[in-house]
Image (cartoon, rainbow, N blue to C red):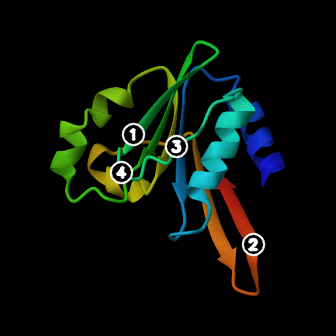
């Protein structure tokens, strides 16, 4: 998974901004993949899961990076209260878990990554990527 994360980041760093949607069931590895991509960008500190904070901001080599976990959002109104609409306009790399919760904002992602677990190998994942 680390090589996939590094290759994905290499393709994104030529852009000023990128919005990456991460799809998958609970436990599929969305947060782990995001952590690897942040490390590939150069983040050396601890990577916290945004499960409770919903948004974790980072600054890596002068670049704004946001990791969003929208699993706990109850309705579209919360998107506006959190300022997500404004955040999505920034020149930043934004990784979004549970992007289905953004439908009201009609966001167009740079990449969509789908993670699926392999029922025969618990540590294996199938990855599909679309741009």
Quote the CA–CA distance across marks 4 and 3. 10 Å
Quote the CA–CA distance across marks 1 and 3. 10 Å
Image vertical order of residue 31 relative to residue 10, above or below: below
Image vertical order of residue 113 relative to residue 55, above or below: below
Q: Residues within 10 Å of mark 3 (few under 14, many from 20)?
A: few
The mark lying in front, picked from 4 and 2, is: 4
Left or right: 57 as drawn, with respect to 35: left
The mark lying in front, picked from 1 and 3, is: 3
Q: Which residue is mark 2?
A: 123
Quote the CA–CA distance across marks 1 and 2. 27 Å
The mark lying in front, picked from 3 and 2, is: 3
- Quarter of the picture holding the N terminus: bottom right
Relative image position of residue 117 (x, y in whole percent):
66, 75
- Label whose residue precedes the other's in the sequence (1 or 3): 3
Left or right: 51 as drawn, with respect to 76: right
Q: Which residue is mark 3?
A: 48
Quote the CA–CA distance across marks 3 and 2. 21 Å
Q: Which residue is mark 1?
A: 55
The mark lying in front, picked from 4 and 1, is: 4
Q: Secondary structure at mark 1?
A: strand
Q: Residues within 10 Å of mark 1 (few under 14, many from 20)?
A: many
Q: Which residue is mark 4?
A: 52
Quote the CA–CA distance across marks 4 and 2. 25 Å
Residue found at x 69% / y 85%: 119
């Amino acid at each position: 998974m680390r090589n996939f994360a590094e290759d994905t980041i290499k393709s994104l760093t030529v852009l000023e901004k990128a919005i990456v949607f991460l799809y998958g069931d609970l436990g599929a590895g969305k947060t782990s993949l995001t952590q690897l991509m942040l490390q590939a960008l150069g983040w050396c500190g601890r990577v916290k899961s945004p499960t409770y904070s919903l948004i974790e901001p980072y600054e890596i080599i002068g670049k704004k990076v946001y990791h969003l976990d929208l699993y706990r959002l109850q309705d579209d109104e919360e998107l506006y209260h959190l300022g997500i609409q404004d955040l999505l306009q920034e020149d930043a790399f934004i990784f979004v878990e549970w992007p289905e919760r953004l439908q009201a904002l009609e966001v167009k992602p740079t990449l969509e990554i789908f993670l699926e677990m392999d029922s025969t190998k618990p540590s294996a994942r199938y990855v599909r990527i679309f741009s």
